[in-house]
Amino acid sequence: MPQKKKMDDLIKQAEELGVDELWVLETERTVVKMSSEGRERAKARWERVVIEAAKQSGNPALMRVEGPVPFEKALEQGIKDSDTAFLFHPGPSGLSFSSVVEKLRGGEKQAVPRSIFLFFGPEGGFSEREVRLAESQGIQKVFLGDTTLRVETAFLGVVSAVRFLAGGQ
């Protein structure tokens, strides 16, 4: 969960790119902490941002925003309806993004997934405990390259690529 303006921009971009659902995560390294009152105000603001972005982009469907939710809850509830899930984390031990692209194209004799859940971490990435927990749920860790990207940069690049691979749908 980036700070206010960055989060609003990320929500706008997600709606414009046709994301169906956006789950705002609270992780061990999340910097922004909210009270329950702050959560309600933020959620109402995010819903307004979605409506404004949908109007601007002409997108007929409104994205659903969940959260902020603890990382563990997203693992339990979010991925159950997903065909495939990837966790983007700095460090070369994960799949390369080109491998992910092949999977999404249906390469390696795999079916193209109908739904994809993408996890982007906070500043500093997910904790090792969170990475292990995700991997134990079958989520594949992905490495985006030698440079460390901000969450909003990684999000925009990956979601744009996924949208392109899906034929703009």
Image: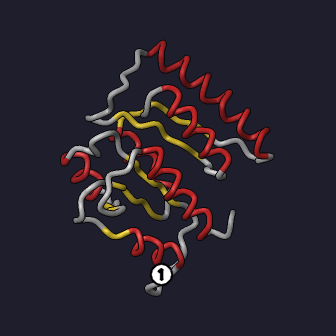
Assign the N terminus to one quadrant of the image. top left
Q: Is residue 31 left or right of residue 114?
A: left
Residue drawn 54% across the image and 22% down it: 42
Report which residue position mark 1 lands on: 110
Q: Amino acid at mark 1?
A: Gln
Q: Is residue 32 above or below residue 65?
A: above
Element assignment for label 1? loop
Q: Is residue 4 left or right of residue 50?
A: left
In the displayed orientation, state which residue is furthest to the bottom: 109
In the displayed orientation, state which residue is furthest to the front: 147
Q: Is residue 111 above or below residue 157?
A: below
Q: Is residue 132 left or right of residue 148?
A: left
In the displayed orientation, state which residue is furthest to the top: 37
Assign the C terminus to one quadrant of the image. bottom right
User: How would you rate the neighbour count of disc 1 (Cα within 10 Å): few for under 14, some for 14-19, many for 20 or more?
Assistant: few
Residue 137: percent from left, percent from top: 31, 57
Residue 118: percent from left, percent from top: 45, 54
Count the numbered circles shown. Answer: 1
Foreground of the two, 114 or 159? 159
The answer to whether any part of residue 25 appears in the image is yes
Q: Which picture quadrant has residue 97?
A: bottom left
Residue 129: percent from left, percent from top: 19, 46
Q: Which picture quadrant has residue 84?
A: bottom left
Foreground of the two, 128 or 17? 17
Q: Which picture quadrant has residue 138?
A: bottom left
Residue drawn 29% across the image and 61% down it: 146
Residue drawn 32% across the image and 32% down it: 30
Residue drawn 61% across the image and 44% down it: 13
Q: Is residue 147 left or right of residue 3?
A: left
